[in-house]
Image (tube, rainbow, N blue to C red):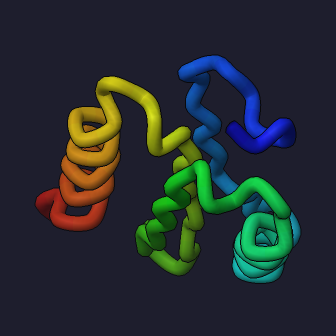
């Protein structure tokens, strides 16, 4: 096992702050950090963008591939994003 990888099933979920309109920049920065992380092969990063009126919101989920509930966690994230994206007007 890679010593850089934590041995716990924790999940990181983040939403980029929108107050200054730089959420797209923040999202790209997080993705770049993840890509450059030496232990990234042990994790799955799933990103999403949700349009809310004039604002674009960016969220991501990072979870270890070894998490026993990985498929369930990713499916729940996708379902939540789908609900937020396809909500009735």
18 left or right, relative to 82 = right
Which corner quadrant holds the C terminus?
A: bottom left
70 vs 52, nearest the viewer? 70
Q: Residue furthest left?
A: 88
* Position of residue 45 measured from the top left corner of the image (x, y, whole percent): 54, 59
35 left or right, relative to 63 = right
* Position of residue 7 measured from the top left corner of the image (x, y, whole percent): 68, 21
Q: Quadrant of residue 24?
A: bottom right
86 vs 37, nearest the viewer? 37
For the point 45% across and 67% down, the residue is 48
* Position of residue 60 measured from the top left corner of the image (x, y, whole percent): 56, 56
* Position of residue 26 measured from the top left corner of the image (x, y, whole percent): 81, 71
Q: Quadrant of residue 30?
A: bottom right
Residue 21 seen in the current view:
no
Looking at the image, residue 27 lies above or below residue 82: below
31 vs 7, nearest the viewer? 7
Instruction: Give the mark count.
Output: 0
29 vs 69, nearest the viewer? 69
Which corner quadrant holds the N terminus?
A: top right
For the point 57% across and 51% down, the residue is 43
Looking at the image, residue 4 lies above or below residue 27: above
For the point 55% across and 75% down, the residue is 56
Q: Quadrant of residue 82?
A: bottom left
For the point 69% across and 59% down, the residue is 40
């Amino acid at each position: 096992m890679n010593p850089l990888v934590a041995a716990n099933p924790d999940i990181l979920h983040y939403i980029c702050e929108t107050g200054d309109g730089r959420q797209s920049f923040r999202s790209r920065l997080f993705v770049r950090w993840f890509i450059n992380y030496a232990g990234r092969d042990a994790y799955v990063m799933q990103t999403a963008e949700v349009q809310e009126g004039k604002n674009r919101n960016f969220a991501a989920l990072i979870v270890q591939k070894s998490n026993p509930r990985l498929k369930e966690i990713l499916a729940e994230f996708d379902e939540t994003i789908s609900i937020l994206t396809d909500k009735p007007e």
